[in-house]
Image (tube, rainbow, N blue to C red):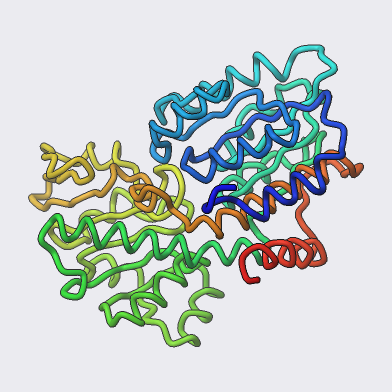
Amino acid sequence: MNKKDLFATKYYLNEILLKYNKLNIEIIIVQHLLSDTLLFVNHLRECGFYINRVIGIEYSSKKRIVNKLKINGIKVISPSFDDLQRTIDEIQSELLTKNSNKKFIILDVGGYFAKSILKAQRKNIAGIIEDTKQGLWEYEKISNKIKFPILEIANNNLKKIEAQFVAKSILKSIYINLINLNLDIKKMSIGVIGFGDIGLSICKILLKNKVKYSVYDSSAVKEIHAKLMGFNFVSREKLLSKSNLIIGVTGAESILLKDINSMKNKTILVSGSSKNIEFQTNLVNKVSIKTKLINKNTKLYFLKNRKSIIILNSGYPINFLNNSSLPLPISDLIFLQLTHCIKKILVEKLPFGIGGLSSKEEEMISKIWKKHHFN
């Protein structure tokens, strides 16, 4: 056994899922193609699942992982991010509209199948499993029309554990990029837009390390939460005008085109959520006179208002610049939840629409994970 492995996930697959009939089930996976995904796919195959294909997200897929999957006989598609949705739509048209006895379990990470899933032949879909809040929001838009089960793990308590490690990865990548720009994070004012699980974790780390920061969220509930916890919650206007570096972790559009005029000269923009939704670089291009590539991860935009801004990683989530966004034990916790969701689809008669894991199920998953990582 590898010294570094998804120990709990492998145990669950081999000891629990191995006995269930998977003859007519094929799995389609949309994922960040990192070393942990390679392990997960390999363990699924060892358990007897047929992997129809793996679809990699460009900004978070490593070429060596793509190549290893292909060497292992897996059909892998890794389109450009601009072509990702079109590619998934074509896959749905090809596979999910055929009159076949085969059923598909789809592991999604961002709601990519939600865009056109209603056009698919519903009896082919055994179920969809969604990993992220942003993806969950996409499925919620069509929830009243769904005729198959969708299981989400985005809102459960175990998922919150992941947020603190994502926050560490975001700040690590920022720190490395600032060094490359000859900048010291402790001499800067950091603005955090979004006080969800990741935003909260980022603020905790900045506060602990005595980095000057401020945070803003449009939710009044989160404002109360932040202020009562002692965080430096400020108005949106103050954050935009006083920050040297702004981290967007809302899962939506955190920086609007009109906001650019309020920002300091050479403000650095960083995304900490999925896709390129926090601030869209195509909008920045509209108010730019020219651009300059500082390094492969950093671009300087000269604006029509005579200011300039810097965008890291083209507006895509910066945490994936690391070789792995999460420590392997935390990935194991996430994949273990996904594996349990696969079991539920295989053995339970689930209602149509969106569902999740019960607190009892989370407790069971935690006990399995604990045996492999704490003992």
Residue 69 in the image: above or below residue 132: above
Residue closest to the eye, 180 or 50: 50
Residue 199 in the image: above or below residue 16: below
Rendered location of residue 51, percent (x, y): 66, 27
* Residue 355 shown left or right of residue 116 in the figure: right
* Residue 14 shown left or right of residue 280 in the figure: right
Furthest residue in direction front, as rendered? 1
Rendered location of residue 272, percent (x, y): 40, 55
Which residue is depicted at the point 42% across and 64% down? 167
Residue closest to the eye, 200 or 322: 322
Which residue is depicted at the point 46% across and 26% down? 78
Quarter of the image for the C terminus: give it: bottom right
* Residue 79 shown left or right of residue 141 in the figure: left
Q: How many numbered marks appear?
A: 0
* Residue 92 shown left or right of residue 239 in the figure: right
Which residue is depicted at the point 61% across and 61% down? 159
Furthest residue in direction left, as rendered? 306
Residue 109 in the image: above or below residue 241: above
Residue closest to the eye, 202 or 229: 202
Residue 136 in the image: above or below residue 204: above
Rendered location of residue 298, percent (x, y): 20, 46
Rendered location of residue 288, percent (x, y): 16, 40
Q: Quadrant of residue 241?
A: bottom left
Q: Quadrant of residue 280?
A: top left
